Amino acid sequence: MTTTPAQRIARDRTRVLAFPRPDRPAVVVGGGPVAARRAAALTRAHTPVVVFAPALCDDAFDLLAERLVTWENRWPTVADLRSAWLVHAATGDARLDARVCALATTARTRVA
């Protein structure tokens, strides 16, 4: 049986809420293995996923190559996070993850 990149990558015990939002993307910040696993799990929930990172690991690149995610070669801004229904910070840097969380909070509390 052949597995897709998303199935292969997401073999960990990541669980995603079954609330697909085809009108609003999920945002994953980070391009490493943890971010790739979270992005793969989100794609299984039929949610559009945007990955923000200056570089991608092989697993994240496989998701991109299969057109399961889109990639922004930069860190996100508040404007990027406004339309997201979920933001997952997985950069591997606690300070950067905290900054992403603060941006997501700002995006949620700001009146558009």
Image (tube, rainbow, N blue to C red):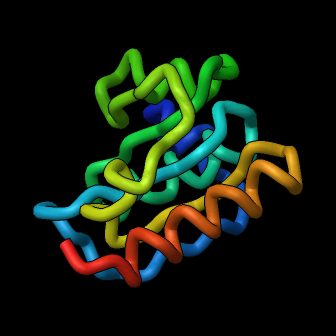
Q: In this view, does 62 lie above or below 78?
A: above
85 in relation to 7, above or below: below
Q: How many dots with numbers? A: 0
- Which residue lies most toward the front here? 111
Q: Is residue 25 above or below residue 36?
A: below
Instruction: Tell me which residue sits at (63%, 67%) in the image.
Output: 101
Q: Is residue 9 left or right of residue 43?
A: right
Q: Position of residue 63 (x, y in %)?
A: 46, 29
Please identify the quarter of the rendering in which residue 88 is found.
bottom right
Q: In which quarter of the image is the C terminus?
A: bottom left
Give 4 or 90, whichever is nearer the viewer.
90
Query: Residue at image x 49%, y 42%?
Result: 76
Instruction: Mark yes or no: residue 1 visible.
Output: no
Q: In which quarter of the image is residue 20?
A: bottom left
Q: In this image, 14 relative to 48: left or right?
A: right
Provide residue 85's location: percent of width, then percent of height.
33, 71
In the foreground, 21 or 45: 21
Residue 100 percent across, percent down from the top left: 63, 57
